[in-house]
Amino acid sequence: MVGLIGLVVGSFLNVVVHRLPQMLERGWWGDVAGQLGDVDSHRRVFGREPAPSLTGAATALETSLVALPAMTLSRPASRCPHCGHRIRWYENIPILSWLVLRGRCSSCGAGIGWRYPFVELLTGALFASVAWRWGADPWAVGLWCAAVALLVAMSAIDWDTTVLPDNLTLPMLWLGILAAAGGWLPGVSLLASVAGAAAGYLALWSVYWVFKLATGKEGMGYGDFKLLAALGAWLGWQAVLPIVLTASAMGAVVGLAMKATGALREGRYVPFGPFLAGGGVGVMLIGLPQVLGWMGW
């Protein structure tokens, strides 16, 4: 039953993965327009009045943003991006509708990507796995299902955009700390949760700066720090190293495979977030004591 709920949640996560980056980008362009139109800030930084072209660009940006149709996670209703056909409820049944439609829009026949049913199936399988792992503890099941949903959404967004949104990483971080404070995360005390959040953030933050000082390049983004901090909050400080080692191994294998097959273009890189998420879920499902035992700790 929990797995079936996961299929439905996975259908919603497809909407989150598609729309949240666009919503964030609209906000960022709004910030750009605000900065271009901030005359006082321009005077403080450059010591002179802004050129008319800058204020004109700010006005044009604001006008363009206002003209865009409203977008939230619930509005507008799901539509085919090719022909605008509104998706009916019976065309939106997880997995089943995609199979019945043979992966094509019922109106224009355009292909529907395989990732939609994949995200649904993955979320359902992970929800079922969480229920198998924590079935005797309904609080742990509910909380970990929420965490898994956030991880699936973050992984897909990071894979597409190389961005891990604060809108997802920070709520997961605080939810983990609050769950530990309430005693709802078996085996994770509040102290272990806070220490895990700090250890997760500082571990990758330190690697980032060592790499940047040595090479002058940025090896990862700040979203990776926050994601590992969130996983540390959920699993405790002892889980941080196993997660990083697992994620690094998975990322290296996938990156080399993509490089060998030509799927990884020159100058691009494989985002680390999906592998951190995979490492965290793996440690949770196997159990931290078992993982630490394998490591000889």
Image (cartoon, rainbow, N blue to C red):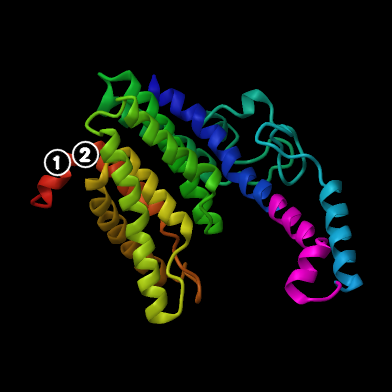
Specify the amino acid type for callout 1. Answer: Gln
Does the CB distance between marks 2 and 1 fall below 8 Å?
yes
Q: Quadrant of the N terminus?
A: top left
Q: Disc 2 designates what residue?
A: 286
Badge 2: residue crowd in 10 Å (few <14, some 14–19, many ≥20): few
The answer for how far apart the CA atoms under marks 2 and 1 are is 7 Å
Residue 246, position as x, y percentages in the image: 27, 54
Residue 141, position as x, y percentages in the image: 34, 25
The answer to whether residue 32 is magenta is: yes
The answer to whether residue 83 is magenta is: no
Badge 1: residue crowd in 10 Å (few <14, some 14–19, many ≥20): few
Q: Locate residue 148 relative to residue 167 in the image: left or right.
A: left
Question: Element under label 1?
Answer: helix
Q: Is residue 156 visible?
A: yes
Viewer-proximal residue, 47 or 263? 47
Image quarter for residue 3?
top left
Question: Element under label 2?
Answer: helix
> Which span of residues is magenta-colored?
26-49
Image quarter for residue 182?
top left
Q: Is residue 276 above or below residue 268?
A: above
Q: Is residue 202 above or below residue 121?
A: below
Specify the amino acid type for callout 2. Answer: Ile
Q: Which residue occupies the extreme bottom position in the image? A: 215
Q: Disc 1 designates what residue?
A: 290
Q: Is residue 271 above or below residue 89?
A: below
Q: Which residue appears at 34% of the width and 50% of the height?
A: 198
- Majority SS type along the magenta span: helix
Residue 41, position as x, y percentages in the image: 76, 65
